[in-house]
Image: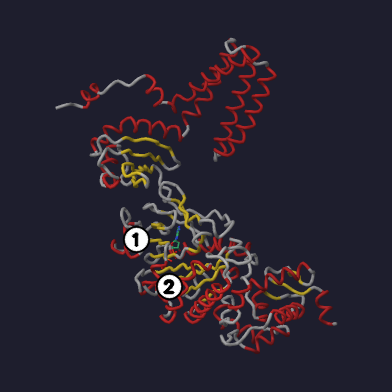
Amino acid sequence: MVTVQQRRKSEPRESLFTVLWRHRHRLAPFYTVIAVWALGTLAFAWLTVVTTVLICLFLLGISALWVGQVLDRKIERAYARVVVFSVATWIVAASALGSNHPIMLRALVIGGLIGAIPWWLHRRVRAQVRVERTIAAWPRVAETAGLARSRLTGVLVTTWGWTGRLRLAAGQTARDVTGRLRTVESALQLPVGSVRAEPWADRADIAVMRVIEADPHSDPIHWAGSPAASIADAMPVGPYDDGDVCRVPLYDRQTGTHHALVAGTNGSGKSGLLNLMACHAVTAPDAVLWAIDLKGGIELRPWWPVTDWLSTTADSARTMLAALREVIDMRGQHATKRVWQASPEQPVIVVLIDEAAELPVECVPDLESVARRGRALGVALVLATQYPTVNAVGSAQVRAQLRTRVAFRFLKSGEASTVLRDTTGTDPAVIRKDRPGCGYVEAAGAERPALVRCYWVTDDLVSDIVETWRGRQPALDPVTADVVSTFSLDTDDEPDTTPASRETEASTAEPAAPLAALAERGPATRSPAKKRLDNEHARKALRAALSAAGEEGTTVEELGAVCDRRKTWIYRELDALETERFAERTGRHGYYRGTPRLRNEHTD
Ligand SMILES: Nc1ncnc2c1ncn2[C@@H]1O[C@H](COP(=O)(O)OP(=O)(O)OP(=O)(O)O)[C@@H](O)[C@H]1O
């Protein structure tokens, strides 16, 4: 029997060059010192001191920019800048004194040693050294794991571990690697579950191997709050378990909107993801948010000030879907391009539906129609449900249109296939219960079968975003606005004041004239058949309401009810009135009043 030692002896001896290359990260400070000495020698031999200074200043400028771009940690940037500056100073001095001058040599050796210590202690370098050892040991590991003759190449150390390409022997595939992950972990003495493998899309004989040394999913990851520059930008959902960020498109300019199905058991993180999508939609300058929350508004109601339409009951959801269907009809008739081109003048409508299974069955034809035709006409549907059965999402037709799929935790293994098209290597039933927001994502550009932890948007963050973005959403395009204006604004579309609280307010307060008229009219329910005020009358009503609001002022919601318009229209008009100095904000948040100028105009 051949022992490990005998086998090692029989292996061919490596050349000095291979050894120096393999240990390049550990030996980098020595290589740098030699390179600096050589540059000093060249500068002394060929350049004047002035030329050397100019070249060094130029290189210092470039490296300062480069360091700022490449290194994300302050301490790393500081280290790099000190090293670059010291090297430049030494080369300039060497161009005057010569690099073999005893003082220069002493400075180089001492400086090199001082610079090398933080380098050797650095976490990433130590990780790199560990990786180099793994690469060296790979032929033996591969043999033990049944992947003989495979080679580990292109290894990169990441924040969370390392990633490499496994070049497989003829006949081996990525599936062979996934089947042997536990053996590989054992041979490399790594924790269970820390090695992942995925196929390489371009070549069947290459697998991507990832080793996770620190788990990026161990704690909730708060949303960083970056606004979307456009709804056409893919939305960052959260990091995969190797730290790469998963991005999901809600819309793209070539193929239109991407409808989505979000499913998982209760408490698995569906509403969290809807909140993340709401952040994306309300901060994008070319999208408006419509939302149906059939949990009575508990999840999406906080977004109401920045939504264009929020429904919290089955009845108003039915109205919204009927309106959407008509919007699509009209957009289709007026469309000049094959795919809706989102812009602030013609925004995409992002429709979030929480608890889609609660939608009344009468909605199904409208939902089917919107799912089928909305893609090319700027309507993005996102359905969240605990039960991803055909019935829960309306029909097989609707489900077929939901091209983005997100599967959070399920109770049973088989359930994954009701959401994900490809369940190889994924099992949402084994997602840890204490990791809400973890799930598998299938979307254009996000096909990896790896776990993602969605960014978490806290309630405080939702309030902050709503306050910051209030009034900044685009107005609906005229075609859509015309259609929407013929649909009723049900009482539950105005959830800041429940019907009950509105009754109390009406009986206790003494509202200004137009608002009193509203109170007399009762709750703001309109029949779908009733036509709205035209724009001219709505503008007159707005001016009258503002001038009647007195010093106290009035809210956008109340103005919306008086003028028969949604908030985006009111905000746009208020902006114009503010510019003309006819309206102003009172000191109280969200309250507006007419200026003396407007009041005088009205008295006249
Ligand atoms: N991405 C996340 N990161 C961290 N914690 C999360 C995340 N998503 C959700 N949670 C936590 O899990 C809880 C439940 O999440 P959520 O309400 O989104 O679940 P759900 O799937 O919508 O549940 P249900 O179907 O019962 O409404 C949240 O209150 C929050 O504490």
Q: Is residue 406 above or below residue 65?
A: below
Residue at 61 percent of width and 61 percent of height: 285
In front here: 40 or 214? 40
Q: Amino acid at mark 2?
A: Ala
Q: Horizontal and vertical percent for residue 158? A: 44, 40
Q: Report how far apart the C-alphas of labels 1 and 2 lie in the structure.
A: 20 Å
| Quadrant showing the C terminus | bottom right
Q: Disc number at residue 301?
A: none
Left or right side of 257 for 393: left
> Residue 42's quadrant in the figure?
top right
Q: Horizontal and vertical percent for residue 454? A: 45, 56
| Quadrant showing the N terminus | top left
Q: Horizontal and vertical percent for residue 59? A: 62, 28
Residue at 64 percent of width and 12 percent of height: 97
Q: Horizontal and vertical percent for residue 218? A: 41, 50
> Residue 269's quadrant in the figure?
bottom left
Q: Is mark 2 within 8 Å of ligand 1?
A: no
Q: Is mark 1 within 8 Å of ligand 1?
A: no
Q: Which residue is mark 2?
A: 356
Mark 2 secondary-structure assignment: helix
Residue extending furthest toward the left: 1
Q: Are marks 1 and 2 in contact (CB under 8 Å)?
A: no
Q: Is residue 492 above or below residue 76?
A: below
Q: Amino acid at mark 1?
A: Arg
Residue at 59 percent of width and 23 percent of height: 87
Mark 1 secondary-structure assignment: loop
> Total label count?
2
Q: Which residue is mark 1?
A: 421
Mark 2 or mark 1, which is nearer the start of the sequence? Answer: 2
In front here: 409 or 563? 563
Left or right side of 22 for 13: left
Which class describes the residues within 10 Å of circle 1: few (<14), some (14-19), or many (20+)? few
